[in-house]
Image: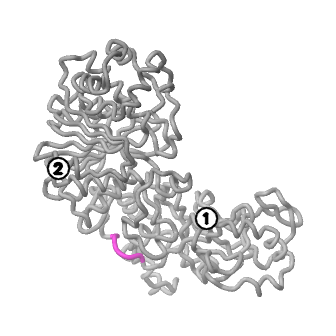
Amino acid sequence: MNFDHIDIVYEALSFFQENKTANFQEINQLLKAQSGVIDFFEKEADYIQLKQKVETSQSVACESRTEYGDFQTNRNLSLSITKYLSNKDITPQVLIEPTCGKGSFILSAIQTFNSLQQVFGIEIQEVYLWELKFELLEYFLKNPTANKPEIHLYHCNVFDFDFQQIKKQINGRELLVIGNPPWVTNSTLSSLNSKNLPTKSNFKNVKGIDAITGKGNFDIGEYIALNMLDLFAKEKGNFAFLIKNSVIKNIVYEQKRNKYPISNLEKHTINAQKEFGAAVDASLFVCKFNSPPEFTAKEFDFYTSKSRVTLGWINNKFASDIEKYKKYQQFDGVCPFEWRQGIKHDCAKVMELERIDGGFRNALGEEFELEEDLVYGILKSSDLQIDRIDTPRKYTIVTQKKVGQETKQILENLPKTKAYLERHKEHFLQRKSSIYKGKPMYSIFGVGDYSFKPYKVAISGLYKQTKFTLVEPNGTVLLLDDTCYFIGFDTLEEAQTVQSSLNKPEIQAFIESFMFTDAKRAITKELLMRIDFESNARQPKRCVVEGQLNLEF
């Protein structure tokens, strides 16, 4: 280990200067007695290196934060969390932090819990472990009468670590599993060629098209949290993780299937921008081990302790606000229409166009002419912020009328379009999604007869608003991109009736009761297919009797 760029605090530096004559065995014994850390120096070479560099102490040169999902917990926050746990009469004897980083939680726990007997910390970045060791030494040098647990620190990838060796040592004592695991997904780390990845596995058993189109992607923090619950939920103790809100939602959602013996589930929302400088919705998730399984979680504001909502399972349904859901649960069923997602091409620089005089311009700044045969106006999520729309900002080339259709013959009669696509063939070849594998060149996805219905009721999948927009043709039908969901209709009357039903206050409140606004996609097909507005649409059925509308549900 090179100590040239590790910050060694003054008290620790003084300790090593005072004991510079100690040999390897002696220094480890002294450090165990002084700091509680077992095998402070695992290798004699590290001790020799430190002695040579003991006169220098510079700031740490850390590795990529992104590669490790690295948002270090500041000491004020970690101490507030451990004090909150203490106020709940949590008195751990054994503490495990599976991704301890610089050790804010370990240091705060030692400061808070006099009951601690053993501490286990695992961290992939060796430089962080050394900083933690030096800070532990400093703390106990300054606080010689403080409770000093036996501390085991492991330089290891959490995905390779054998937690069974810790589990065997618990022996019925009260456990606290605490931490702040990485806030990144496996696909993000894979794109960085990171080594900080679990063994490839479909741990959530995602199948078919869901796995192909992204649901097989998972959050690393969720993987670690579920692994800890698998290992320790039957032990006496508690769990406290800082994780993304989407992960908490998934843990509570999967609780119906997993049935972990956990109770008193709590979600305490924090300001991640203030605490970590991260534009992420995150919270402290707390639960009690070794208890009858519960399937709901109470949400609070961490800073004020103000109660917000209760999320989780009710009557075999999953809700973001259980009290609101109870009022409108009569609308929870199966939507009488099939919601569709818009067109996916993964080639925006080439396929998304603007009209200019006499032709088109793409995102590369190129200007050109095309035949109109395959050009359609396309709406994006940002366009669906109004009640009705019939004018697009963007246009796209629709190379197929259904998925898998051969494109070669279609393009033979359109020389300008064919030449344009061939000129940018490389962009299509670089598309990474496996949905295009084995498909005709210039294929698109999410297209079918439903795409070309003249009238549509649509909603953005990216924005938090739940209002539905009426999409009308403008000379030709307008399409939507894959960030949008829609139902297609043949007549304006049908579309208007359904839009009106969906935008009624009671339906809007129902959607809000089971929509998670902090999700990456707040609106999903699964959510939309739960909206059974049939009982809300009896008025259109009366119109059928009056001969004003031919619409059935």
Q: Which residue is mark 2?
A: 168
- Of the 4 image quadrants, the one containing the C terminus is bottom left
Q: The residue under label 2 is which amino acid type?
A: Lys
**Label 2 Cα crowd, 10 Å radius (few <14 / some 14-19 / many 20+):** few
Left or right of 234: which side holds 202?
Answer: right
Residue where numbered disc 1 is placed: 388
User: Which residue shows up at 17% across the image and 25% down it?
Assistant: 147
Q: Quadrant of residue 79?
A: top left
Whether residue 371 is visible to the viewer of this picture, yes or no, is: yes
Name the main secondary structure of what is drawn in magenta.
loop
Whichever of labels 1 and 2 marks the residue nearer the N terminus, that label is 2
Q: Secondary structure at mark 2?
A: helix
Q: Residue at x 62, y 71 (%)?
A: 343
Observer-nearest of 322 and 148: 148
Which residues are drawn in magenta?
331-335
Crowding at mark 1 (Cα within 10 Å: few <14, some 14-19, many 20+) = some
Quarter of the image holding residue 348? bottom right
Depth order, front residue of 284/306: 284
Q: Is residue 275 magenta?
A: no
**Left or right position of 120 against 9:** left
Cα–Cα span, label 1 and label 2 = 63 Å
Query: Amino acid type of disc 1?
Result: Arg
Q: How many marks?
A: 2
Left or right: 549, with 352 as reference point: left
